[in-house]
Image: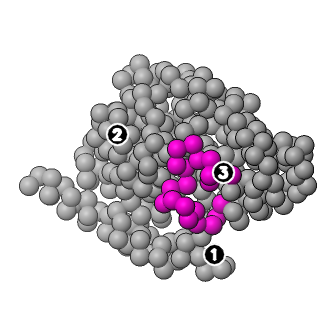
């Protein structure tokens, strides 16, 4: 009865907040589609995918994570969660990989061009970038997932289309480059100190990422794999954000309930909506929080 009353109260709060903010919904692009920025674990660039505006609105109305939270401020959302769960202590932190924990050290198109020159790649960096975006925006017909196991078939298609070069040696050199320390660097230089403080305070940590099986070698190359109690990577979980399954798997690996978890990521659709659909709290990197020290302070841990 208490839980039912809590959910009823939360529903009233949510409905009120949605009504107050309904007129602020994100509008469609000029071509009539809603535009979302997604991550890319091979080159780390931002790119766009389009979704039908009517479908997006219908999805927003029918799903908890999308229903109104796109336009609600963080304080409004926290009010909703408090009405639903009461005062919840965050026992675990989930962190997105590309764009939040780490970023490419050099622009993708520059690397594709630089390595590709000895294999006959003639496209300019601008051409490579534009072709890459077109290729990435197309549905991947071979599987419901882009990153299956090591992701090679998907990335071979992307590299070949982006550069016009299908040389196997070129692909393998490029593919291997993105497993090295040279290819990546940490977003926040204070990350290690903050994560160690969180772990000392009893907060469990996990990476949750749309990535192929190279993620673990990448984390090892950057010497940060030991910071985390678990890694939930889409190629292993067989679910990609914003599918709630990958967040629930991370919670299972950490032994915590979703409502006891906060996820931090830089993609509103994949990270924020996905985590909230799973019942987790979620903060947008670069908007709600700007550093891991700020994340720790919000959790209640002094660094």
Judging depth in this view, the residue of 99 and 184 nearest the camera is 184
Residue at numbered disc 3: 155
- What residue is shown at x 42% (from left), y 27% (from top)? 229
Where is residue 127 shown, x and y percent of the image?
A: 84, 60
Q: Is 140 within the magenta?
A: yes
- Identify the element where label 3 is drawn: helix
Residue 227 visible in the shown view: yes
Earlier-in-chain disc, 1 versus 2? 1
Residue at numbered disc 1: 29
Q: Which mark is residue 264?
A: none
Earlier-in-chain disc, 3 versus 1? 1
Camera-near label (2 vs 3) is 3
- Identify the element where label 1 is drawn: loop
Q: Is 159 within the magenta?
A: no
Q: Residue furthest left?
A: 1
Q: Is residue 65 left or right of residue 170?
A: left
What segment carries the magenta color?
136-156
Where is residue 149 shown, x and y percent of the image?
A: 52, 44
- Specify the principal SS of the magenta part: loop
Where is residue 28 shown, x and y percent of the image?
A: 59, 76
């Amino acid at each position: 009865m208490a839980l039912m009353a809590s959910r009823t109260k939360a529903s009233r709060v949510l409905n009120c907040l949605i009504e107050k903010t309904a007129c602020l919904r994100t509008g469609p692009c000029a071509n009539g589609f809603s535009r979302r920025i997604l991550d890319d674990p091979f080159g780390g660039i931002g790119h766009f995918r389009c979704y039908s505006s009517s479908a997006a609105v219908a999805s927003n109305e029918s799903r908890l994570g999308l229903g109104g939270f796109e336009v609600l401020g963080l304080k409004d959302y926290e009010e909703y969660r408090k009405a639903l769960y009461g005062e919840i202590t965050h026992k675990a932190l989930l962190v997105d990989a590309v764009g939040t924990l780490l970023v490419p050290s050099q622009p993708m198109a520059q690397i594709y061009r630089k390595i590709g020159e000895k294999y006959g790649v003639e496209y300019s960096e601008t051409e490579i970038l534009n072709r890459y975006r077109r290729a990435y925006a197309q549905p991947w017909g071979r599987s419901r997932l882009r990153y299956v196991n090591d992701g090679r078939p998907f990335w071979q298609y992307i590299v070949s289309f982006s550069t016009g070069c299908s040389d196997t040696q070129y692909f393998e050199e490029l593919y291997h480059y993105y497993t090295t320390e040279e290819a990546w660097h940490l977003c926040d230089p204070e990350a290690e100190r903050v994560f160690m403080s969180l772990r000392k305070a009893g907060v469990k940590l996990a990476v949750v990422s749309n990535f192929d099986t190279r993620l673990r070698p990448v984390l090892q190359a950057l010497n940060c794999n030991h910071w985390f109690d678990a890694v939930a990577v889409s190629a292993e979980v067989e679910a990609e954000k914003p599918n709630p399954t990958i967040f629930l798997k991370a919670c299972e690996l950490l032994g915590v309930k979703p409502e006891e978890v906060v996820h931090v990521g830089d993609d509103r659709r994949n990270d924020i909506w996905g985590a909230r659909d799973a019942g987790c709290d979620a903060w947008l990197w670069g908007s709600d929080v700007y550093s891991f020290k700020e994340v720790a302070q919000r959790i209640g841990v002094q660094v």
